[in-house]
Image (tube, grey):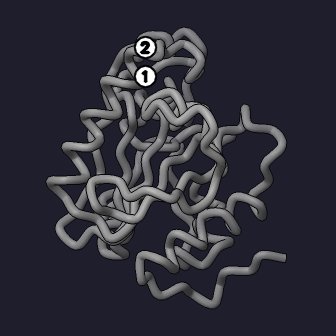
Amino acid sequence: MGFTRAELEHFRDALVPDMIGPDLKLLFVGINPGLWSAAARTHFASPSNRFYPALLKAGIIERDVDRSDGMSDANRDYLLGRGLGITNVVHRATAKASELTRDELRVGGERLRACVALHQPAVVAVAGITAYRDAFARPKATTGLQDETFEGIELWVVPNPSGLNAHETVTSLAAAYRAPAIAAGMGLHPTGDLH
């Protein structure tokens, strides 16, 4: 299937619910849902998004997750069973993250603090350095493990998997995502191949 540009526009400002289970180890935090994600009601759903291929390449998951038309219950249960969770700094869908205001990012950052305090993952990984800098007033932050914790939880900032982030590859994303997964105590699958 797929969506036309006109169909996607109907999902502007729509919400994608958090995907968080009871045994949360690693909480990935996107900037905000894209229009395709809102239409499919699935995080990182756009066919150009490299999130799930990077998880597979890193060995965080051992099977491909088809999500472009919406995630199946079986795939959702599989990810939750692995201890993976997904939320966003800002919940409203836009065509590009650059459409968000700094105020929206800051308010979303406070909401994220409450979410992390409630669910207590082992590790939080924010996917997007610019959004992290704006949401948490850390203008000099760099990617990787952060010096500070986030509500007492180990915090990583990793590259955004969007197809618009052209200088990243599935391999470079996989390497960046693997480190917080190891820190979260997730057993990695031998399918992961970073070459």
- Return the x and y of residue 74 as percentages of the image width and height: 33, 66
Q: Which quadrant would residue 149 be assigned to in this image?
A: bottom left
**In front: 78, or 124?**
124
**Within 10 Å of the Cα at label 2, are there few (<14), some (14-19), or many (20+) other Cα atoms?**
some
Q: Which residue lies under the disc numbered 1?
A: 93
- Return the x and y of residue 35 as percentages of the image width and height: 49, 24
As measured in the structure, the alpha-carbon distance from the residue carrying label 2 to the one carrying label 1 is 5 Å
Is 104 positioned to the left or the right of 9 in the image?
left
Mark 2 and 1 residues: CB-CB less than 8 Å, in contact? Answer: yes
- Return the x and y of residue 67 as percentages of the image width and height: 49, 49
Looking at the rendering, in which quadrant would you find the N terminus?
Answer: top right
Residue under the image location 60 percent in, 53 percent down: 158
**In front: 40, or 146?**
146
Q: Which residue lies under the disc numbered 2?
A: 12
Asked whether the viewer can see residue 62, the reply is yes
Looking at the rendering, in which quadrant would you find the C terminus?
Answer: bottom right
**Within 10 Å of the Cα at label 1, are there few (<14), some (14-19), or many (20+) other Cα atoms?**
many
Residue under the image location 83 percent in, 43 percent down: 167
Is 168 positioned to the left or the right of 50 in the image?
right
**In front: 171, or 46?**
171
**In front: 148, or 92?**
148
In the image, residue 129 sits, relative to residue 53, either above or below, namely above
Q: Name the amino acid type tagged 1.
A: Ala
Q: Name the amino acid type tagged 2.
A: Arg
Residue under the image location 42 percent in, 83 percent down: 185
In the image, residue 23 sits, relative to residue 10, either above or below, namely below
Asked whether the viewer can see residue 32, the reply is no
Is 120 positioned to the left or the right of 156 in the image?
left
- Return the x and y of residue 79 as percentages of the image width and height: 38, 67
Residue under the image location 40 percent in, 42 percent down: 42
